[in-house]
Amino acid sequence: MVSRVILIVLDGVGAGAAPDAAVYGDEGAHTLAHVAESVGGLRVPNLEALGLGHLGTFAGVRRTAQPDGCFGKMAALSKGKDSTTGHWEMTGVVLEKPFPTYPNGFPPNVIDAFQQAIGRKTLGNYAASGTAIIQEMGLQHLQTGSPIVYASADSVFQIAAHEQVISVEELYGMCRAARKLLAPPHQVARVIARPFTGEPGAFTRTNRRRDFSVEPPAQTLLDGLKADGYPVIGIGKIDDLFTGRGLTRAVPAKSDSAALDETLRALQSIPRGLIFANLIEFDMLYGHRNDAAGFAQALQAFDARLPEILGKMQPDDLLCITADHGNDPTRPGTDHTREYVPLLVYGARMARGVNLGTRKSFADLGQTIAEALGSKRLAWGESFLHVVMPS
C-alpha cells in the first residue's frame, strides 16, 4: 500500500497537440518539443532518467534504455484548456461543457452589474496581455481610480489595480463581488486579482495575484481523501483552484522555487496523504509571454531540484509529475494550447520502465492515486496502479 503521494503539476508543460487540437485552433502545438528546439536542446537529466525521452523527440533529451520511472501521456476528456479544468479532471471531475470565454470583452450587462457592485466605473474590458494592458491603461487608472477589467483567451475575468490606488484587500473584495455575480451563463472559471505598482511607463505586476475559482461541481479526489482522514496539502495555487475544498492545509508560494521548498518541508513533516503542488511560472511567466528561452530555463531549474524531492521520498511514496494543459510559447498569441500532458510516475517500490501509454483522461491519474491510498473510487478515470505496482 502507498502511504503518501506527491503530485507535482508543471503548469502549461504540454506534450504535443491533442487529437481535437484543431477545434481550439492549436494544430501543431507541442510545448516541450518546440521549447527544446528553440534553445538548441534541453538539459534535464533527472526527468530524462524518469523516462521523459520516451514521450517524444525533444532536442537534447535522450531516450534512456532503462528509465527509473514509468511514463506516458494523458489526453483531456473535459472541454476547454484552462488550469481549473485540467486540475479538476486529474482529481476526477470531467466537464462536458467548457467555461465561457470573452475574446471581445464582457457584455454590458456583466460590466454594469460589476460596476454597481463595487461602486466604481471600470476601464478596459477587452482581451489583452496583462503586462500590456497595465502600460496602456495605467495612467488613466491613476487619474480616475477605476479598476482595469480585461479578458483573455482563457475563461477569466481579470481585475488590475495599482496598490497605491486600490489596496490589495479592496481588490480582493472586488474579485469576490465579481465571483458572486458571474453566474451561468457567464460563470468563468476564475476571477483573478492582478495588483501592480510603479510609475507610468514602468508599471510592474506584484506577486500578490490571487485567483477566485468557481467551486468544483462534484466530489474530487481531495474531498474523498480528506473525508477518509488523510492530510491533503495544497501548495501554490491549488487552494485557489479548488476554493480550498478538500484541503487540510493550504500553503501559498510566491515562486516555483518557494513551492518546491514547501514541498520539501511537507515531505519532512507529513508522513501520509497527498502533497499536491502547482508550479505556475512555466505558464504565467514564459508561456503567456512567448518566452521559450525562459520556459527552457524553468524546466532545467525544476530538473536540477528534482533530486531533492527524490531524496526525501520514503520507500512507500509515489511521485507523479504531470501538467494541466499546454502553453506553447513559440506559437502566435499567448493562449493555452490543447495538448496531451506528460505523465511520469516513480516510487522506490514501483515498477520501472513501464510505458503507461496514452491515457484517455487526466482522471486516470486521480483514480490511480485514490486506489493507491485506499480511498473511494472516483466518478471518472481508469486506474493504472496495477501496472506500476504489480502484486
Image (tube, grey):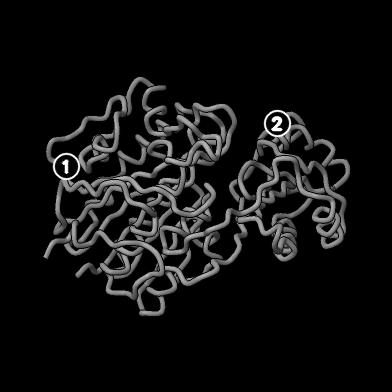
Corner quadrant of residue 130: top right
Who is closer to the viewer here, 276 or 93? 93
Q: Which residue is mark 2?
A: 202
Q: Residue furthest top?
A: 40
User: What is the residue that sits farthest to the bottom in this orientation?
Assistant: 228
Disc 1 secondary structure class:
loop
Judge whether 59 appears above or below 321 on screen. above
Q: Position of residue 87 (x, y in %)?
A: 46, 56
Q: Amino acid at mark 1?
A: Pro
- Residue type indicated by callout 2: Ala
What residue is shown with label 1? 67
- Residue 39 in picture, x, y percent from top left: 39, 22
What residue is rendered at 70% in x and 31% in y? 202
Q: Say few, some or many: other residues with alpha carbon within 10 Å of mark 1 (under 14 / 14 to 19 / 20 or more).
A: many
Residue lying at 47% horizontally and 63% vertically, measured from the top left: 93
Q: Position of residue 331 (x, y in %)?
A: 52, 27
- Label 2: how many Cα within 10 Å (few below 14, some 14–19, many 20+): few
Residue 258 in sight here: no
Query: Could one spot residue 227 in this view of the protein?
Result: yes
